[in-house]
Image (cartoon, rainbow, N blue to C red):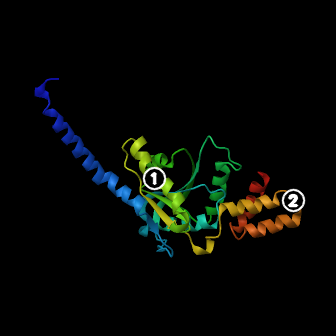
Amino acid sequence: MGDKDTPWIPALFGIAASIFAFYWTTILAPHVYRILRPSIVEYPWDECSSNESDELDETVVFAASYNPPHHGHIRMLEYLSKKYKRVIAVVGFNPSKKYLVSPEDRANLLREMLKSRTQNVTVEVVEGYIWRYAKRIGSTLFFRGIRSWEKDGRDERYLQILNTWGPLLYGPLTKPIPTIYIEGDPRYNHVSSTLIRSICDRSSDSNNVEQTKNTEALLSELVPLEIAGKVAKLYGAKR
């Protein structure tokens, strides 16, 4: 390359810098800010009217393992169903990982829990990166449930980074979907999937009818009464 071509080099650098500046200000910077200052719906929530005209015409995704689903999940999904027209409860799974209770079984439990409570929540099982599924269906927001940012923020930040940089790096250069966190209803903040599995585990070795009734009674405080027996049977039998 001769000396006469060298003036193009600063011009190319200038173009590249302009493109990066545009990309940073319009796409990267807002999402970096959200990682540093996450958006949190604090409790008590602003409960919306159930009037359809008040619902935002958007599709949102609420992702969790639902292993198993419980009152805390349901309460948040009920809130979202009043605020948005379409809510997708995503049961995510890694195909290379072995699960004691399959994602399909968990999804069926959640569907049964929701069928008499919401009309606009759909339950889907999604393999791999959930952000790809959310992009495909035109979702505008990700939601995640937390007890509080102080208690759960450290673990959640990793997923937020994945959902932010995944689309940018593997999209490629796809605009990420914002993540919003919902603080749980304090009445159910003691409820966790781990606690439910522990209760089922303790009763799984017993064929005692009285023990089975006691287990279902304990579970009825953590999951809807009509589904407590199924949860006990499904999770107890898998141990």
Q: Residues within 10 Å of mark 1 (few under 14, many from 20)?
A: some
Residue under label 2: 206
Residue under label 1: 161
User: x%, y% of residue 130?
Assistant: 51, 49
Q: Nearer the viewer, residue 143 or 10?
A: 10
Q: How many marks can you see?
A: 2
Mark 2 / mark 1, whichever is N-terminal: 1
> On residue 2, which mark appears?
none
Please identify the quarter of the rendering in which residue 16 is found: top left
**Marks 2/1: CA distance?**
44 Å
Please identify the quarter of the rendering in which residue 203 is found: bottom right
Q: Nearer the viewer, residue 239 or 214?
A: 239
User: x%, y% of residue 77?
Assistant: 55, 64
Q: Residues within 10 Å of mark 2 (few under 14, many from 20)?
A: few
Q: Is residue 213 left or right of residue 12?
A: right
Q: Secondary structure at mark 1?
A: helix
Task: Give the residue displayed 42% in from the left and 41% down from the top.
Answer: 170
Seen in the picture, residue 26 relative to 220 is either above or below; the reply is above
User: x%, y% of residue 91?
Assistant: 58, 52
Label 2 vs label 1, nearer the camera = 1
- Which amino acid lies under the numbered mark 1 shown in the image of this protein? Ile
Q: Secondary structure at mark 2?
A: loop
